[in-house]
Amino acid sequence: MSLRMEKVNSEMRRQIMEIIQQEVDDPNIGILSITRVDTTADLMEAKVYFSLLDELQYERVQGILDKMSKFIRGNLGRRIRIKIIPQLKFYPDDTIRYSVDINARIEAIKNEESQKE
């Protein structure tokens, strides 16, 4: 990925997070964090990954964010100076859950090995 795309993705992540925190008044979202943004090279689409404190709410919050994507995109267009503001697609980021799962498996293996000794 080019340095320019990294900067665009980083700035979009920061701005989307600010828009959600400051301009979206929906208590159903809860505590949300935008973890990363991956924009296509032609700037037509951006995958926006989010993380929640309550993992059981991912599907519901994804639906809310998808409905609000035009509002967020419009605000993003007023904040970022790029030729094309990409269409936003929201996806849950499960890397935290994945790393917790891996740590739990490692601990289980360690416990099994210590019981064998």
Image (cartoon, grey):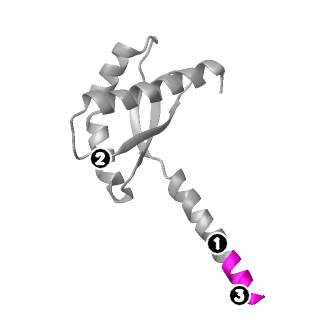
Tell me which label, 3 or 2, sits earlier in the chain: 2
Amino acid marked by disc 2: Gly
Outermost residue, bottom direction?
116
112 magenta-colored: yes
Q: Provide the residue span drawn in magenta.
A: 110-117
Image position of 114 (left or right of 108): right
Residue shown at the point (44%, 10%) measured from the top left: 81
Give the answer, above or below, for where 117 lies relative to 83.
below
Q: Position of residue 88 (x, y in %)?
A: 39, 31
Tell me which label, 1 or 2, sits earlier in the chain: 2
Give the answer, above or below, for where 29 lies relative to 2.
below
Q: Are marks 1 and 3 in contact (CB under 8 Å)?
A: no
Residue carrying label 1: 107
12 magenta-colored: no
Residue shown at the point (26%, 37%) measured from the top left: 67
Q: Which mark is residue 115?
A: 3
Q: Residues within 10 Å of mark 3 (few under 14, many from 20)?
A: few
Can the viewer see residue 83? yes
Can the viewer see residue 70? no
- Element on which disc 3 rests: helix
Disc 3 versus disc 2: distance between alpha carbons?
A: 42 Å
Residue carrying label 2: 30
Q: Residues within 10 Å of mark 1 (few under 14, many from 20)?
A: few
Give the answer, above or below, for where 1 lies relative to 96.
above
Amino acid marked by disc 1: Glu
Q: Position of residue 63 (x, y in %)?
A: 29, 45
